Amino acid sequence: MSEQRRGQSFTHKKVFSIRMAYHLKSRFDRLRERGMLSADELALQLGVCTTTIYHWGHEGFLREHRYGNEFRCLYEPIGDVTLIKGKGGRLPKAPAFITVPFTTQGAI
């Protein structure tokens, strides 16, 4: 009977059974441990709407990490940056991130 199972693809149910049997973390949990953010969290941090985060992720402006099905993803944190918003229209301008320089002003 085991020879009949060889060559078959993994299903969601098979992967779930293996994860439970060996106490393995899900991809979502592993990504969150690495500091990945949801679209809502990143939108709040940048001061934009969640739809903008999705759009930027699809365009490659933000780095997406997929989990679950093909639509779910988490995003890499962007660190200490300032967002310069772009604009649409006839002469569109892409958004940009500018790194916030470290200063010692005000430090005593």
Image (spheres, helix red, strand yellow):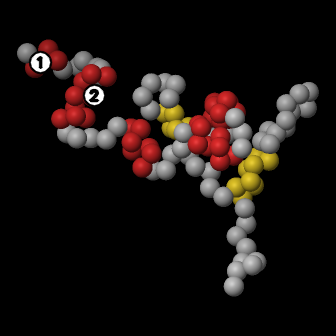
Q: Which mark is residue 3?
A: 1
Q: Quadrant of residue 108?
A: bottom right
Q: Is residue 63 visible?
A: no
Q: Up-down: is 55 above or below 76?
A: above
Near-viewer residue (40 or 17): 40
User: Amino acid under label 1?
Assistant: Glu
Q: Residues within 10 Å of mark 2 (few under 14, many from 20)?
A: few
- Most extreme residue toward the left, as rendered? 1
Q: Up-down: is 9 above or below 76?
A: above
Q: Is residue 67 left or right of residue 39?
A: left
Q: Is residue 7 left or right of residue 32?
A: left
Q: Which mark is residue 76?
A: none
Q: Which residue is mark 2?
A: 15
Q: Residues within 10 Å of mark 1 (few under 14, many from 20)?
A: few
Q: Up-down: is 1 above or below 40?
A: above
Question: For the residues marked 2 and 1, what is the alpha-carbon distance in whole angstroms?
Answer: 19 Å
> Which secondary structure, mark 1?
helix
Residue 96: percent from left, percent from top: 76, 46
Residue 75: percent from left, percent from top: 56, 41
- Most extreme residue toward the right, as rendered? 90
Residue 8: percent from left, percent from top: 24, 18
> Which secondary structure, mark 2?
helix
User: Amino acid under label 2?
Assistant: Val
Residue at 22% from the left image edge and 34% from the top image edge: 20
